[in-house]
Image: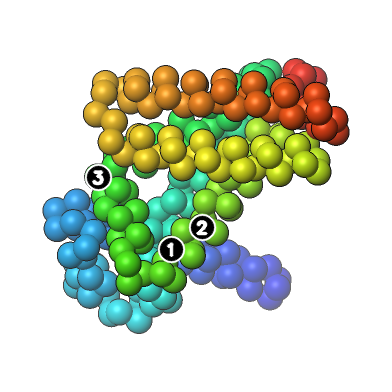
Amino acid sequence: VYLQYCNTLYCKTMVNEGQQADEILDTALMLAQHSGWEQLHLFDIARELGIGLEHIYRHYRQKDDLVEAWFDRADQAMLRAAQSDGFYQKTVPGRLEYLMLVWLDALALRKRITGEMLWYKLEPGHIHLQLAAVLRISRTVQWLREAARQDSTHLTRIVEELGLSAIYISVFVFWLNDASDGQARTRRFLKNRLQQAGQCLQFCRSVFPGSTDRDREEP
């Protein structure tokens, strides 16, 4: 009974901690929508929520951790989308297209702030943030490949990872500047880039066999 009580208490604590982290992030996004990301300070968030900075520090050790948490939400939305009905009946390019659009849609409500976050990272004095951005790109691309069930190996895998990283970056930047209805231009751009990449991969596979991508329908 005591162990069960402890487990229940631990679960409740973890839920509360997660809720507070989400509340801090949501408040940061709300404030930045009015002030801009550059002008946002952690003490602004604490004052808005009526909490001490130590509560923010418990979840976010620096301002850029809020950016990482924002992109984590998009990653999680992308991974949940892979569980949708009929997803694995799509071809691998179809899966990648669908997942990347879900990822972008998860950020769409705060699109302007998302762009400001990116430029904040790219400022000359933020080399440490730029290194973190490279790791972020790699992490998201790896989860994108996992969700799409790309299981190629050796040189084909390397080519796929490089190509997908290039597509991911170019589509993200294109999307940030796309004002078309329903992001129609971004959708066309993404489809074209994936088609071009597919042609390149077909050539690569013909020269270097060894890919076993699950293009077939799942049972």
| Residue 164 position (above or below residue 195) | below
Q: Amino acid at mark 2?
A: Val
**Mark 3 crowdedness (10 Å alpha carbons): few <14, some 14-19, many ≥20:** some
The image quarter in which residue 80 lies = top right
Camera-nearest residue between 81 and 209? 209
The amino acid type of the residue labelled 1 equals Gln
Question: Quadrant location of the C terminus?
Answer: top right
Question: For the N terminus, which image quadrant?
Answer: bottom right
Q: Nearer the viewer, residue 207 or 29?
A: 207
- Please report the residue visible at 63 percent of the width from the left and 73 percent of the height from the top: 6
Q: Earlier in the sequence, mark 1 or mark 3?
A: 3
Badge 1 marks a residue whose secondary structure is helix
Say which mark, if any, is on residue 134: 2
Q: Nearer the viewer, residue 118 or 204?
A: 204
- Report the disc number at residue 112: 3
**Residue farthest left in this picture:** 34
Q: Position of residue 19 (x, y in %)?
A: 41, 60
Identify the secondary structure beneath mark 3: helix
The residue positioned 82% from the left and 32% from the top of the image is: 208
The residue under label 1 is: 130
Q: How many marks?
A: 3
Instruction: Say which element carries label 2.
Output: helix
Please state the horizontal and vertical placement of residue 218, each as a whole percent of the image.
76, 22
Q: CA distance from mark 1 to mark 2?
A: 6 Å
Give the Cα distance between marks 2 and 3. Answer: 21 Å
Look at the numbered discs 1 and 2 and tell me whether their residues touch, using CB distance below 8 Å. Answer: yes
Q: Residue at x 51, y 69 (%)?
A: 13
- Kind of residue indicated by mark 3: Arg
Q: Position of residue 103 (x, y in %)?
A: 46, 38
**Residue at image location 56% in from the left, 70% down from the top:** 9
